[in-house]
Image (cartoon, rainbow, N blue to C red):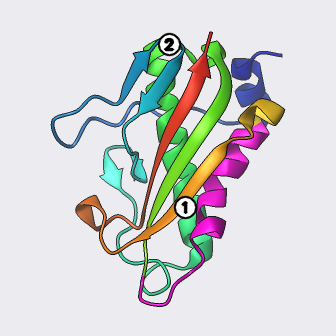
Amino acid sequence: MTHSDRLTALGIDLPDVVAPLAAYVPAVRTGNLVYTAGQLPIVDGELVRTGKVGDDVSAEDAQALARTCGLNGLAAVHALVGIDAIVRVVKVVGFVASAPGFTGQPAVINGASELFGEIFGEAGAHARSAVGVSELPRNAPVEVELIVEVA
């Protein structure tokens, strides 16, 4: 089963690539790796939530937003090389705009990590960082970037 078939079976549609918000491109390939820019929880061109996790945004809602970021990252990869070219997810870096005292960053970024497991199975298992930060662009609660190996 191809990754495209798996997406269909899961009822997942990849979104359109999010237009860059500044001077960068959504994804770059070097050799057999594709690096994505940080992806915000943008749907149909709009940031769907703002604020700090643990204050304005619940950890559960932030986990769903991290999933959206992950889908946006996959869309960027797909636009560059095609989703079926992905061999494995190598690394995920997640940033969580955190209220003081919030320490649940790993659970938030699981929203993206679990998505990759659903789609790619064992090839979705990856190294990861989940980092709490004071601010993200446009007051986004979460941002996710990917490194994937491609054929």
Q: Secondary structure at mark 1?
A: strand
Q: What secondary structure is marked by label 2?
A: helix
Q: Is residue 9 left or right of residue 55?
A: right
Q: Nearer the viewer, mark 2 or mark 1?
A: 1
- Residue 28 % position (x, y): 37, 22
Quadrant for the N terminus, please.
top right
Q: Amino acid at mark 1?
A: Ala
- Where does label 1 land, which residue? 130
Residue 117 x %, y %:
76, 41
At label 2, counting other C-alpha atoms closer than 10 Å, the crowd grade (few under 14, some 14-19, many 20 or more) is some
* Residue placed under numbered mark 2 in the picture: 81
For the magenta stretch, what is the residue range? Answer: 99-118
Q: Residue at x 66, y 68 (%)?
A: 107
Q: Position of residue 76 (x, y in %)?
A: 44, 28
Where 84 sits versus 50, above or below?
above
104 in magenta:
yes
Q: Position of residue 32 (x, y in %)?
A: 54, 14
Q: Main secondary structure of the magenta part?
A: helix
Q: Identify the image quadrant of residue 135.
A: bottom left
